[in-house]
Amino acid sequence: MLPPVNLRPSFNITRSSHVRLTVADLAESRNFYVNVLGLVVSDEDERTCYLRGLAEACHHSLVLELDEGGGGTCRRVGYRVFFDEDLDLAYAWFRERGLPAEWVDVPYQGRTLHVSDPIGTPLELCAHMETRPRLHIDFELYKGAHAQRLDHYQIFAPDTYELCAFYSELGFRNSEYLEHGDKLLGAFMYRKGTCLDLAIIENTGPALHHFAYTVSESHDIFTACDWAGIQGYGDGVERGPGRHGPGGMLFAYLRDPDGHRVEVFNSHYQTIDTEIEPVRWDAAALSTNARWGLPALEKWYFEASPFVGVKQIPPAELPKPMSLERYLLEQSAH
């Protein structure tokens, strides 16, 4: 069901690192991420805001870039590599396969490489960033949900297996996966030794379904929802609080002022040991992908942030999830 994993890849990606979003109103988006999620501003100017979680020492895990055209798109998702020489190896690896690879200058980062995966997902690789003090025990500075660190992304892809095979060649392993019959529908992949850096779900893509920050306590998830309501974003609490089946984490999903989806959740288990086998989930037995509660709204399953300038491709068959709308319709028929 799963493609083979290269445990000694040509270059060493260590973790998910940062995401770059376009926004229509920089001040409004800054307010959401600072006062609802509790992120910290590392630097900012009139067009860009760099943010990080309270436990993060690296300069940024979220970059908001003003786009007078309306915002709502994702420029790139970022990964760290271990050594600077891994960037040179990555450049050669992508070029040898006919995939885009170019060097760019990016503020607050060391040498930075822009590449794309086979479906066009724009990636940003770097080995180094400037650092700032961690603020995780500066409790007097806490705001919102006290988000600690960026953990993972979820990407829509037209063929889960093919994209899973690509990232498996780069050393990504699966902690869990979702299948139906002989069809791989979802792959939950990691590099950093927890259960997730990248989730791949079959749907029209590439598109960024969500990015996720950890919180320290379960009540911080409710705090995110409370502060969303206080700040006027209550309608953007899209799903949860709830508990995932895959991963088992408590979660809530919120939409920011531009419609980007961000998850807050309370950490997860370790997977670093090589004998750990991925957990299989049967899609036919999952109505909500959660342990309890009603299914998500249909938009949760299909809406996602497009990548700037990247054409989206539909899957051979669109998913047919048990959405809240479908669930209520079926219940009313009974």
Image (cartoon, rainbow, N blue to C red):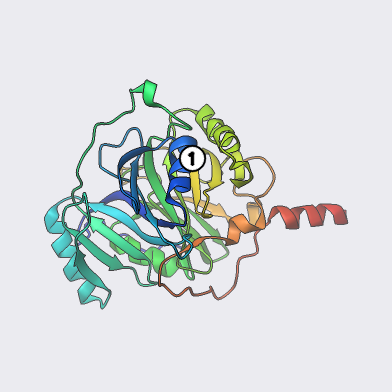
Percent across and percent down for residue 33 are 45, 42
| Near-viewer residue (176 or 218) | 218
Residue 277 visible? The answer is: no
Is residue 49 shown above or below 187?
above
Instruction: Identify residue for label 1.
Output: 264
Residue 113: image quadrant is bottom left
Percent across and percent down for residue 248 are 52, 39
Whether residue 66 sits left or right of residue 88 in the image: it is right
Whether residue 298 sits left or right of residue 29 in the image: it is right
Q: Secondary structure at mark 1?
A: strand
Percent across and percent down for residue 190 are 36, 50
Is residue 148 shown above or below 85?
above
Could you classify mark 1 by the number of other residues whose Cα lies within 10 Å: few (under 14), some (14-19), or many (20 or more)?
A: many
Whether residue 304 sits left or right of residue 130 in the image: it is right
The residue sitting at 41% across, 27% down in the picture is 142
Percent across and percent down for residue 27 are 44, 46
| Near-viewer residue (203 or 278) | 203
Whether residue 106 sits left or right of residue 216 in the image: it is left
The residue sitting at 26% across, 43% down in the picture is 59
Residue 75 visible? The answer is: yes
The residue sitting at 23% across, 70% down in the picture is 101
Residue 284: image quadrant is bottom right
Is residue 300 shown above or below 242?
below
Q: Which residue ends up furthest to the right in the rendered image?
A: 334
Label 1 amino acid? Val
| Near-viewer residue (230 or 104) | 230
